[in-house]
Amino acid sequence: MRILALDLGTRMGVADGDSSLFGKSHFGECPHIEAVTLRGTSAEKRARFLGEWLHEKLCHWKSEGPSEQLIITEAPMNPAASKSADATIYQLHLHGTLQGVSAIFDVDVALAPVMAVRKHFCGMAHAPAVCGHKRTSKEAIEARKFINEAVLRRAILLGYLPEGSTGWDEANSCALWDYGCAKFARSIPSELTMYGEPA
């Protein structure tokens, strides 16, 4: 199964590869990983850029011949939980574009729960809870940094990204691709890597 994992955002993490590569990253075989900047001065223009980029990508997929194909991305945040109307509108623009362009090419889109992806990839869904009180704004920022760094360390450990990598977006796309291989392609990794070190 060909899987395209997209960590949607202005700087979009991308992991693109066949699920047969699952578990082979330690042997130098892994999906193509990159970050793509969605250019534009507004949500509408950046969504249009995404549409044009995705259209070109899927045209290339189709030219390579028939194969089972899937796009995976994080499920959108519930608008009721968002603290920013602009962020919510931007998110809906990107997801709408993704769904529309993929439908033209008859490619399914899987919306993965972010907590499930993190739990699968690095063994934890979120940063350790703060006892006795709700997180302050500063603590919430630190918690987000903690979990993103955990995902990044795991992507490096598994060989998706080289030592010294700092890109959270690329790491999140690796996590999505890895999750997609395990859940939708039912691939089995050829090498077992624990959460601390290779087994």
Image (cartoon, rainbow, N blue to C red):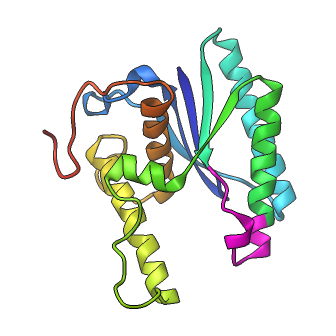
The residue at the far front in this view is: 132
Tell me the residue at 36%/41% (across/down). Answer: 160
Q: Is residue 11 left or right of 167 when viewed as pictured?
A: right
In this figure, what is the number of numbered marks?
Answer: 0
Q: Position of residue 44 (x, y in %)?
A: 86, 57
Is 140 placed left or right of 188 in the picture?
right
Quadrant into which the C terminus falls: top left
Which residue is situated farthest in the top direction here? 65
State the residue at coordinates (30%, 28%). 189
Q: Which residue lies furthest to the left in this view?
A: 199
Tell me which corner region of the image, top left, top right, bottom left or bottom right, holds residue 102.
Answer: top right
- Residue 174 visible within the image: yes
Q: Which of 94 and 108 is in front in this view?
A: 108
Residue 80 drawn above or below residue 161: below
Can residue 165 be seen in this snapshot?
no
Magenta-colored span: 75-88
| Foreground residue among 59 and 93 | 93
Outermost residue on the right side: it is: 44
Q: Is residue 87 magenta?
A: yes
Q: Position of residue 146 (x, y in %)?
A: 37, 70
Q: Quadrant of residue 132?
A: bottom left
- Give the answer, above or below, for where 106 lies relative to 4: above
In the rendered image, which quarter is residue 101 located in? top right
Depth check: give the residue in front, 132 or 19: 132
Q: Position of residue 185 (x, y in %)?
A: 48, 24
Can you say whether 199 is above or below 65 in the image? below
